Every structure is written in C-alpha cells, then in structure tokens.
Amino acid sequence: MTGEDLSTSERAAARLEAAAAGLPPLRAGQESLNEEICDRLIDLAAARAAVARPAVDEGGHDAAARSVEACVCRAVEDDVVRTLSRTGTRLDGGPSLEDTHREVTRIVTRLAEPDHYDAVCALLRAGLGDRPDGRAAGAWDIADEALRGLVSARAEWAGADPACTVAGGWVLVDRVARVRLTAALLAQARARGGNDAGHLVNAARRYAWNWLRLPPPEAATAVHVRRTGELAAWIGAFAAGGPATEGGAG
C-alpha cells in the first residue's frame, strides 16, 4: 500500500471521528439512544483498527490491498453520513454523490477482473485468520460466512459486464469493507490482550452482527437497470403530482 493510500484511510477515519464527536454522552434511562450512540462509536473503533493495521501488512498484493482500502474508505464515509444524520453535526469536505458513484464504478470495474476478485477475497481471508477461541469466535463466524458468500457470488461479479454490475456495486463494496473492518477489530483484540481485548471482541461481535448478517451481495442485471429507470420515472411523476395509478389522477 502506498503512502497516499494510507493517508486516504487516515482521512476517512478522521472524518468519522469528527462526526462522532457530536454524539451526546450515554445516560441512564436513555437506553434506545445509548444503543445508537454505541453503534456509531463501534464504527469509529473499526475505522481506527483498519488504519492501525492496513491490509498490505498482512501480505496482500498492492492492487488487492488498494481495492480493499478503497472499499473501507467508502464504507467509513457512509458511516460519517449516518452519524451526521443522527447528530445534526455539520462536517464539510465530503464527496458528492457523483464523486461517490465514480469511485464505486472504479472499484467494481476492477473487481470484474476474475484474478483481481480472487486476490481481494484471498486478502480478506488472510486478514480474518484462523478461528479464534472464546467469544471472539462469534464475530469470526459471521465474518467467515460473509466472506464465503463473496466467494459463492463470484460468478455474478467476476467476468460480468461492469456496465450492469456497477449498478449493484454499492453492496459489493460495502460487504468487502465490513469483512475487512471486522477482521481489523479481531486482529487488534489478538494483538492487545488483557481488558482491551475483551472490549474489542465485544465491539467486533456487535459490528459483525450489525453489518454482515445479510445474504451474499447480488449483482445488478440489465432488467434491474431498466426497472430502475422505470421506477425513477414513476416516482418522479408521482412526486410531481402526475398519474400514480392506472386510470387515476395524481
């Protein structure tokens, strides 16, 4: 991984930290709010862990490590937006929707290369490591299942036409990132030990539970892309007061 890649990851983590700084403190009697605050702080802990242990340190090829890093940065930026939406904190300097789309397109186009897709999955596997003992196994199992899902969905992405698959690329990028971020928390728990390890394991379990219990990411098809256009046109007409149902007025 180049210095430029690492600085990108560090900037993403710094943005999440700045967003999370606007979170209110945990208070007794506000359990629902406390759960939300804790989840956002765990997102921050995962971003910190990934910055502390970049993928290339685990023996990954630079190209695969750059793709994983790009996925992580994209997910962290989503976490920034999610945190801001909860706190009303203003944080300038984020990418536009168009910029984000271009980045997702770039990542998914590269992942359409079968060898590159395999290298990314292999790097994620190396980062996840062997199944740990104790409570950490719960987080590992969820991440392992999610990673096996990426492998099982390979034919949908690798070798497919990026003109269609990029439409569903958001879910692929997020899945790669969340596996990597869960693995980073587990690796940090192994490295630190002691009381810190217990907290990091709990964070990893919660992070994996929040983000990785979904089916394998499915690629978009030409039919899906066409229906997206039809739905967008229909919803636009509906919002503008046009016809919303057959034979009815808007």
Image (spheres, rainbow, N blue to C red):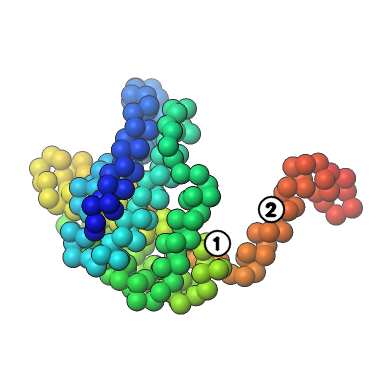
Q: How many marks?
A: 2
The CA distance from mark 1 to mark 2 is 14 Å
Residue at image location 21% in from the left, 60% down from the top: 56
Residue at image location 34% in from the left, 43% down from the top: 12
| Residue 159 at x, y percent in the picture | 46, 77
- The 10 Å Cα crowd at callout 1, few under 14, some 14 to 19, many 20 or more, is many
Work out whether residue 87 can be spotted: no
Residue at image location 69% in from the left, 53% down from the top: 232
> Residue 167: which numbered mark, if any?
1
Whether pointer 1 and pointer 2 mark residues with C-beta atoms closer than 8 Å, the reply is: no
Query: Residue 47 appears in which quarter of the rendering?
Result: top left
As shown in the figure, which amino acid type bears the numbered disc 1?
Ala
Q: Is residue 41 left or right of residue 161?
A: left
Q: Is residue 2 left or right of residue 225?
A: left
Query: Residue 203 appears in which quarter of the rendering?
Result: top left
Q: Is residue 140 left or right of residue 59?
A: right
